[in-house]
Amino acid sequence: MKWENQLSLHDKTYFFTDLQAVADHYQTSISQLPYSIRILLESVVRHQDEEITLENVKPLILWQAANPQGVVPFKTERVILQDFTGVPAVVDLAAMRDAVVKLGGQATDINPEIPVTLVVDHSVQVDAFGNPTAMQFNTEREFERNAERYQFLKWAQQSFDNFDVVPPETGIIHQVNIESLSPVILEKTIAEKTYLFPDTVQGTDSHTTMINGLGVLGWGVGGIEAEAAILGEASYFPTPEVIGVKFVGQLPAGTTATDLALAVTELLRKEKVVGKFVEFFGPSYHQLSLADRATLANMAPEYGATCGYCPIDEETLKYLETTGRSQEVIDRVAAYAKANHLFYNDQETINYTKEILLDLSQIEPSLAGPKRPQDRIALSQVAQDFEQSISAPVGPKGFGLPADELNKTATIHWQSGKQTTIQTGDLLLAAITSCTNTSNPFVLMTAGLLAKKAVEKGLKVPDYVKTSLAPGSKVVTSYLQSSGLLTYLEQLGFYLVGYGCTTCIGNSGPLDPDVTKAVQDSQLLAASVLSGNRNFEGRIHPLIKANYLASPPLVIAYALAGSVRKDLTKEALGVDNNGHAVYLKDIWPSNEEVSEYVQTYVSRQAFQEAYRHLFDANERWNAIETTSSDCYEWDESSTYIANPPYFETLQESLPTHGQLKDLKVLAKLADSVTTDHISPAGSIGLDSAAGKYLASRNVAYRDFNSFGARRGHHEVMMRGTFGNIRLQNQLVPEINGGYTKYQPTQEVMTIYEAAMKYQQAGQNCIVLAGKDYGMGSSRDWAAKGTQLLGVKVVLAESFERIHRSNLVMMGVIPLEYVDNQTATSLGLTGEESFTIDFPENPQINQLLTVTAQKENQAPIQFQAKLRFDSPADIRYWQHDGILPMMIRKKITQRKAAKA
């Protein structure tokens, strides 16, 4: 191995790729490189082969901060999946086994070449809440609803090498990853020599970035890209810029890591860090606990960066010790990181693309909303901001309603005979949920102590507020129980509902039927507050339009207040047992009090106990029976798992590509259309295209489950693509939701119906979009559904990194307007037919001529940039996508081995 060195530890010799030796060879210094670039460099050097060469090393070791050059061919060391995105990825792998066999290979040619862990954490829904049996009920329903999916995953666990499943009722993927799965530094024996190298992770959840808080470089990818990584393919991306965020000062009393994360999100969104790496450093970096760093790293998708990297230091080692890692692991991390220039050294002057200063002393308690995580609002301004949003124009900060909407009320007629009047802005849902905050003992202890003080004052949560506690791991329950704080949370209604993402991904479950009827009858604009990281329109609950992100203690505070229209810095939360007003400041615990609880009750033993039986603790999971065949036995009657059609016409030879002529516009969309708008998510409506399909298969409405649970079935998912109730297709401006105008007849119909009509007529489609198209979660179905609907091209002002990559990997061509042109500036209405002058041998970022022709009008001709960003993108296009390419590669490898 080139540039090899060695170190001795515990009487054992380890070998490693020496970054200093690489720097010496190129006559440069390692000390000015960002730590995240050093990790990329180590990976590229170590993985050199026929495709990864010294040409890929040079742009990294000679990294140009102001203008990075080249493309990084990155091979991750691990892949982590969650069940929503993991099931379709495993479905594809199973389908690829069938395809390989069909072309003369063996099923086992398709096997993970690196460790893969799937964590089942996205399927539990909050059906029951507010009582001691809520979790038991919810998990029983989870297993009932998902029996087919879990049986399929059990088959995968038995049939694939290097594939483990963490069963339900364990924890959230990112928290399990950071608390247990990652050793930070990996070891591997090759030719009787043991090598050390950094753990790196790609995951099918965009919040995979949380692992960067532990000093492990990782980020979210689409399911398709993850499948390629699983099969040994490198992912390719332009050498990134790295933005350094320098921390100075100290967090004021009364603020939390959530407040810091929301401030960083707001700041970096304004700095436009999409597609860039962010790295944290500075005099106050050491003051941040690892849980605080994890909170910051987790929110990278919200501030738009590929990752928010936190270099390894003494706090990393301390966290490894606290979370129960062995002394051998801790010593290995320390020795390797120090020997190979990956241990944080505040004496080094890193050369960042841009340096941003953030004074921690200026952070204040905040929320974000009502529709986006980057729209931070100081706690003192939330009530005013909400009231202004009512009549503000429709958009991220506005609902476009008359001002008197603020005076609207609704009456809840409870089955008990009692009546309650609620009004605009009242809180219907308060959820302590999500990996972002439930990994942080400080904020959860703060929430527990605040609940304790509230109960002791006699405060209560109004009956109309749905409350829930969904921790990220069993460790949380352990320290809340041992500290005696769980009982106070429960007395306010925050009973344990399950270990999973729940509310943050739309699995918030139904509101009380009486509340539902009151809101539906009056069309009341109600609110939710959750400790998650996502609050896009239509995501949290279909009946709740204003959704706010907040720290766990503020979730409780707003639950007590019952409305987002109260200024919690000035107005009382309620009255105590003596009728005296109680304010938030009266029950907010001091930092010293919280720290004492954390130090006393968050123990190494709790972590070790929680993770001792990570893979086999769930008896329901252990009892699932399945086949052990190499190829999956598809059940044609299943509405959860189906063999996808991607490989039906696959041949060993490369396909021929037809011309891009007469493309019809399936949808014309504005800025900031997210993968939540594109990819099916949340509940399945009875009258939706997907709902009608399930009904036709004799599935009862109560068993529809969610789109996330049905991601393994393409017929359901196709019908839900572009089906979000908040989608605004400009072809039908008078209607919200997944509708379009079928151009030949001018009929208005669902996007799915129009797409099928176009396909029956042999007509291909195009989507027109604005800025940041595809921002949001790394949802593979946003690309898969687009492809299956017959969309050949997406023309946008700009793309989110993951979604652009996913489109290319599914054979969909991403084009970008140039010279500040837009659909509006060019006069495009979406009623045109599009022809694209596409070359036989496309080049990276080539300018193409696009002609838009509307009947009886002069054609509109303009240039657009082909967003093929690397040679790999061109290869994917040549093969009609990355999955067919991987199958052909496996067949070629088998033939070469025989020869």
Image: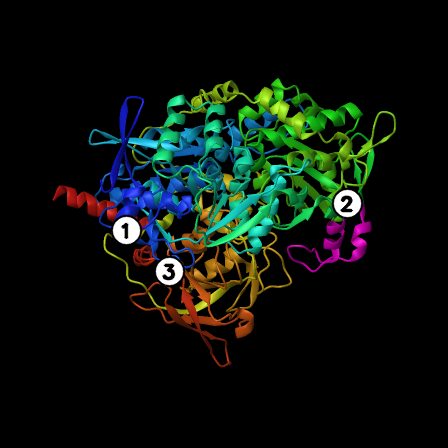
Question: Neighbour class for label 3 at 10 Å: few (<14), some, many (≥20)?
Answer: many
Q: Identity of the amino acid at label 2?
A: Arg
* Among numbered discs 3 and 1, the one appearing first in the sequence: 1
Mark 1: secondary structure:
loop
Label 1 close to label 2 by CB (< 8 Å): no
| Left or right for 265, reference 758 | right
Q: CA distance from mark 1 to mark 2?
A: 61 Å
Select label 1 or label 2 by which is in front.
1
Q: Position of residue 782 (x, y in %)?
A: 47, 51
Q: CA distance from mark 3 to mark 2?
A: 48 Å
| Residue topped by disc 1 | 26
**What residue sits 67% from the left and 40% below the top?**
529
Q: In the drawing, what numbered circle is on residue 409?
A: none
Q: Is residue 415 magenta?
A: no
Q: In the drawing, what numbered circle is on residue 868?
A: 3
Q: Position of residue 75 (x, y in %)?
A: 33, 44
Q: CA distance from mark 3 to mark 1?
A: 30 Å
Q: In front here: 492 or 569?
A: 569
Q: Quadrant of the C terminus?
A: top left
Answer with the quarter of the image where residue 97 lies: top left
* Among numbered discs 1 and 2, the one appearing first in the sequence: 1
Mark 2: secondary structure:
loop
Q: Which residues are magenta?
A: 384-409
Q: In front here: 148 or 304?
A: 304
**What residue sits 75% from the left and 54% below the top?**
388
The vertical placement of 195 against 733, above or below, is above
Q: Identity of the amino acid at label 3?
A: Phe
Q: Position of residue 176 (x, y in %)?
A: 48, 30
| Residue topped by disc 2 | 565
The vertical placement of 655 against 214, above or below, is below
